[in-house]
Amino acid sequence: MSAETTALAGVEHRPGAPKPDPILVADGVVRRFGGMTAVDVDHLEVQRGAITALIGPNGAGKTTLFNLLTGFDQPQEGRWSFEGRSLGGVSAARVSRSGMVRTFQLTKALSRMTVMENMRLGARDQPGENILAALVPPVWRSRERAITGKAEHLLERFKLLDKKDDFAGSLSGGQRKLLEMARALMSDPTMVMLDEPMAGVNPALTQSLLGHIQSLRDEGTTVLFVEHDMHMVRHISDWVAVMAEGRLVAEGPPTTVMADPAVVDAYLGAHHDTDLGDDSLLDDEYTHQLEAEERAEDERKDHR
Amino acid sequence: MDWERILTNVAGEVFAPTTAAYALAAIGLNIHFGLTGLLNFGQAGFMLLGAYGFAISTIAGYPVWAAVLVALACSAIFALILGIPTLKLRGDYLAIVTIAAAEIVRIIGRSTALTDVTGASSGLRGDSYKETFTALSPFGDGSTTLGPFTYSNSSSNSWWIRVVGWVLVAIACVLVWRLLNSPWGRVLKGIREDEDAVRSLGKNVYSYKMQALVLGGAIGSLAGIVYVLPRAVQPDSMGRPMTFWVWTILLLGGAATVFGPVLGSMVFWAALMLIKTVGREVIPTTVMSSAQIEQFGQIVVGVTLMLLVIFRPQGMLGDKKELAINVR
Ligand SMILES: Nc1ncnc2c1ncn2[C@@H]1O[C@H](COP(=O)(O)OP(=O)(O)OP(=O)(O)O)[C@@H](O)[C@H]1O
Ligand SMILES: [Mg+2]
């Protein structure tokens, strides 16, 4: 049991429960798309230095909440703060620079750049990113070397080092997920927000990456991640928050939260005919089906 | 057929001032499109503004360096006006706005209300603004023959404008090469690939796009100056077809490469000249008049562009491997 789990031991098992040391606090965040309310979170606190899982059925509003918290989308109402600073209306780039870095559910690898270039782009404090300094290589060379060293280290960890000179677009789906996560870590964020980081990653590597996420936490990074794989959630999270239909419906430690009637209700409400353990399977099948449809569509286009 | 004359004409086109001007314009567009993914369909507008800025301020008595600064300032302001409302929106908006804005520049330039300043649709005569530039020439009067090429030393379509034009092209190439291989260029390429990813990594995307738009536009305005120095400022010769040709040159040579725009411009103008001169020799005037052959040449260019995009989309210098990557 980690120190964080102990820190969270006294926290009530209810949605919106106050934490001893919250790094992220959101209040009354509401996002509507037309008449449909995608997110309506009354209160949410994320404990500093802990791994918090955000789960919920498809369409629960998890990704939308991520988008709102990281400045990629603006809510109709609500306030939220990161490390005590309000982030309402702050641009996505600023949010990232303040130390909260996210990844995307639909991976955003920079296809026509090499893996290494992708990684370097994740780094901070590169003076050569200024147009005038860029013209004078001595100003940025040494920083570039440091960045490259760090990138190699991370790539090794993520089993991508031998791909470093390949275009990111030539990686497989799972490898892109890994690249995106490694890239997000280039800036040593205070908090990482991972949207389904393990979707499509093979089980053996998942194990080692879970270890990596845990060691990130042990070094003091706060982790908030969305995941459908309950085994992973149970395995590494210190705390679980459950969303359904835009609302936060339950919170608690991973061992007990799945038994919460509100959670059972949320999942069974969404998938009448499946049990909770099958959730990831369902998601994968759905993805495959979508991919197949897309391929068929592409082929149709090509033939015209 | 007089092959020697034809080949001389074609070879002369390779290093003609117009070729240098188009190479510069394409280098500017390369910063927009090749590096950053900005769809600027108004590069001719930047060129025309540069030409006006230079010519009008020279006529007003400014020395060459000041007139060039005026041209650069005009294009920078133009870039800001175009970029502020559109760079936060999706890429297509910039495309539409730049087409329209370039047309607006041309239409304002040719409007009779401004006859005293811009000369309206007949434009500004070359003689009225060439003098200061010609006076800077170290080559003196007269003309010089190098091999088969004879041009005047300093005035109008001269050796002097060729030297200046190609030195500018060389400087622009070095600049692009330096920036392309710098962390700044890396951010631009990231933006070209996926803006949101770059945002999530903490970069101010809007500011980078604006810098690219201004820099590419400024190079475009220099291109405009080089373009008008051997001729006159005529708004109607710097409209949509000019933008279209700059695009053709960039795609022909290869976007996102350093020398693509230069090679593209050389090949483009040499090929056009070849088609034209051979056409005049071979096709009897009863079938096609000289003016029609000119247009025929442009049709061939259009068809070539289509074939190019289909069979060699990366251009002459582009990286096939890079383009083989599906942008998903
Ligand atoms: N841009 C948008 N426009 C309209 N509706 C949207 C938009 N983005 C999300 N939604 C809707 O908001 C709801 C929540 O979507 P969201 O992507 O946040 O779900 P999620 O919890 O991340 O689901 P999943 O587990 O499938 O990724 C969905 O019903 C979705 O249709
Ligand atoms: Mg989602």
Image: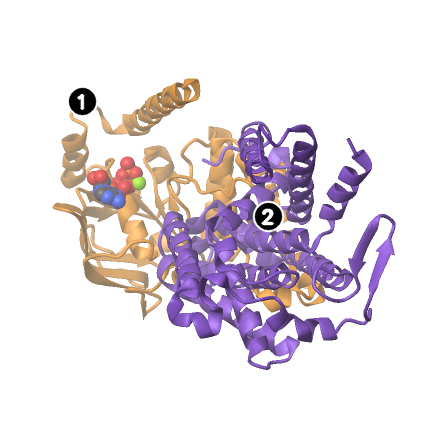
Chain colours: A orange, B purple
Residue lying at 52% horizontally and 46% vertically, measured from the top left: A182
Q: Which residue is mark 1?
A: A273
Outermost residue, front side:
B286
In depth, the one of A67 and B101 nearer the eye is: B101
x then y, percent, for residue B161: 72, 62
Residue A143 showing in the rendered view = yes
N-terminal-most mark, 2 or 1: 2
Element type at mark 2: helix
Q: Quick check: which quadrant has ligand 2?
A: top left
User: How many badges with numbers are in the image?
Assistant: 2
Asked whether, in this view, residue B201 is left or right of residue A168, the answer is: left
How packed mark 2 is, by other alpha carbons closer than 10 Å (few <14, some 14-19, many 20 or more), is many
Q: Is residue A233 above or below residue A278?
A: below
Residue A61 showing in the rendered view = no
In depth, the one of A10 and B112 nearer the eye is: B112
Residue lying at 54% horizontally and 60% vertically, measured from the top left: B47
Residue lying at 15% horizontally and 47% vertically, measured from the top left: A34
Identify the image quadrant of the C terminus of chain B.
top left
x then y, percent, for residue A88: 28, 64
Q: Which residue is mark 2?
A: A117
x then y, percent, for residue A72: 33, 54
Label 2 and label 1: CA atoms lie apart by 45 Å
Residue lying at 26% horizontally and 57% vertically, measured from the top left: A74
* Tags 2 and 1 on a common chain: yes
In depth, the one of B270 and B42 nearer the eye is: B270
